[in-house]
Amino acid sequence: MKTSTCKGCGAEIIWIKTPLGKNHPVDAKAERGWREVEDEFGNPICWEPCAMHKSHFATCPKADQFRTQRRNHGKESDGNTTQRSNEGRALEARG
Ligand SMILES: [Zn+2]
């Protein structure tokens, strides 16, 4: 995995790929978390321990810097966000 340093706060971060193929920074330091295990029908059957990396957008004290860089990238769940990014820009202009 590619590790780097956050330009905002200097923390060590890892770049992961989201299911949508976008790069997303997470804290390099993993916390212990739990993940739901499902059976073949999708029913939860148990939990197992796993390493969880928090989104660095959530933990970075300088997260505002990242937000101003996001212009053409809309919400993560959307594929085509041409109209939405225009709305976003209008909101940003208002402050
Ligand atoms: Zn940071």
Image (spheres, rainbow, N blue to C red):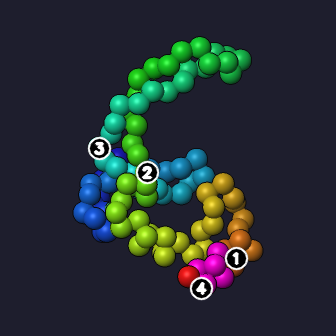
Residue 25, x across and y down, in percent: 41, 56
Asked if disc 2 is less than 8 Å from ligand 1, the answer is no
Badge 3 or badge 2: first in the primary sequence: 3
Q: Give the residues drawn in magenta, as a range.
A: 88-94
Is residue 54 one of those drawn in magenta?
Answer: no
The residue pinned by badge 1 equals 87
Badge 2 or badge 4: first in the primary sequence: 2
Residue 58, x across and y down, in percent: 43, 54
Within 10 Å of disc 2 (Cα), the crowding (few <14, some 14-19, many 20+) is some
Within 10 Å of disc 4 (Cα), the crowding (few <14, some 14-19, many 20+) is few
**Residue occupying image coordinates x 55% and y 20%:** 37
Image-based side of 13 in relation to 40, left or right:
left
Farthest-out residue, bottom = 93
Amino acid type, callout 3: Lys
The residue pinned by badge 4 equals 93
- Label 2 and label 1: CA atoms lie apart by 25 Å
Q: Secondary structure at mark 3?
A: loop
Amino acid type, callout 4: Ala
- Please tell me the numbered disc located at residue 55: 2
Badge 4 or badge 1: first in the primary sequence: 1
User: Residue 65 sits in which quadrant?
Assistant: bottom left
Q: Secondary structure at mark 2?
A: loop
